[in-house]
Image (cartoon, rainbow, N blue to C red):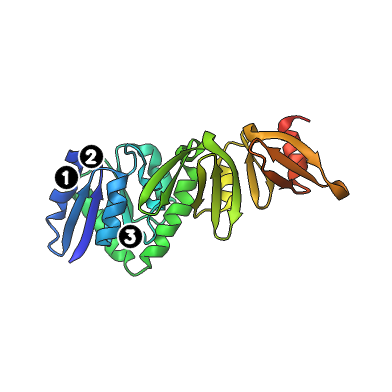
């Protein structure tokens, strides 16, 4: 049996997916989830081949939820908001169902999924994360991270600075550090340029945390933050910071 999940905060929407899926005897709906937190746990527990995923949900949206899953299954997006359609189709997501959708439209999505089984599902899912989540406005105000089995939501205004850490980005806050499997380039593009500046290949600082800029030897400089952290400024980062500060 092919294991499926539906993750949607609307009971009616979940029931419609389950009803349409009854026409497929080789597919089983192993669990219905009403939010992203339940969805992460269900994916870990059941390891489904296919997920029907709503985008706009309370607490964390569908894209943020996918970022917390290490082995991402194939995904068919379902949503009542057509503003995400172009973004979804720009990726290798299986399909995008705009509510309310018919049995025929649902069938077409499943047919497309079966055809995609000839391609690595993981590769397609990774592309969803790289191309779609980079365009989501939520990460301008929050970052969702997974700490062991817990999910934490970090408001962007709590960030002191970001630091490159191997294949991760280390997010520094007053209440601890958190790892996110992203790149510095991603956050340089995503975070508001009026509030965050990349001053070094390994550092992005929050401007409201800056107290002063100190000179070092050989025309190099460091940025001193409120918590005492000293961040090196690269040859390109120093003039960029001065430009944003208007000095």
Q: Quadrant of residue 115?
A: bottom left
Please provide percent x and percent y for residue 48: 26, 61
Please provide percent x and percent y for residue 145: 44, 48
Relative side of 201 to 109, left or right: right
The numbered mark, 2 or 3, whose residue comes first in the sequence reads 3
**Foreground pick, 184 / 24:** 184
Which residue carries the number 3 mark? Answer: 73
Provide the secondary structure element on which disc 3 rests: loop
**Foreground pick, 99 / 227:** 227
Which residue carries the number 2 mark? Answer: 100
Q: Quadrant of residue 242?
A: top right
Please provide percent x and percent y for residue 19: 13, 49
* Cα gap from disc 1 to disc 2, whole angstroms: 9 Å
Which residue carries the number 1 mark? Answer: 16
Residue at image location 32% in from the left, 36% down from the top = 58
Provide the secondary structure element on which disc 1 rests: helix
Q: Establish if 62 lies above or below 2.
A: above
The numbered mark, 3 or 1, whose residue comes first in the sequence reads 1
């Amino acid at each position: 049996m092919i294991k499926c999940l539906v993750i949607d905060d609307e009971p009616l929407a979940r029931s419609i997916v389950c009803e349409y899926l009854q026409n497929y005897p080789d597919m089983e709906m192993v669990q219905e989830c009403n939010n992203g937190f339940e969805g992460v746990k269900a994916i870990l527990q059941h390891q489904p081949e296919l997920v029907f995923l709503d985008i706009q949900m309370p607490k964390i949206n569908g894209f943020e939820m996918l970022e917390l899953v290490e082995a991402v299954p194939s995904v068919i997006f379902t949503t009542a908001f057509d503003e995400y359609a172009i973004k979804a189709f720009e990726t290798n997501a299986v399909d995008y169902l705009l509510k309310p959708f018919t049995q025929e439209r649902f069938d077409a999505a499943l047919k497309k999924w079966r055809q995609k089984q000839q391609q690595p599902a993981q590769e397609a899912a990774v592309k969803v994360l790289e191309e779609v989540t980079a365009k989501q406005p939520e990460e301008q105000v929050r970052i969702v991270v997974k700490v062991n089995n817990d999910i934490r939501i970090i408001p962007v205004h709590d960030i002191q600075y970001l630091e490159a850490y191997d294949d991760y980005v280390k997010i520094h806050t007053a209440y601890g550090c958190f790892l996110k499997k992203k790149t510095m380039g991603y956050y340089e593009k995503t975070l508001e340029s009026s509030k965050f500046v990349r001053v070094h290949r390994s550092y992005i600082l929050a401007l409201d945390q800056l107290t002063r800029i100190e000179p070092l030897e050989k025309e190099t400089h460091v940025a001193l933050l409120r918590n005492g952290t000293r961040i090196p400024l690269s040859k390109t980062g120093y003039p960029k910071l001065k430009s944003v500060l208007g000095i």
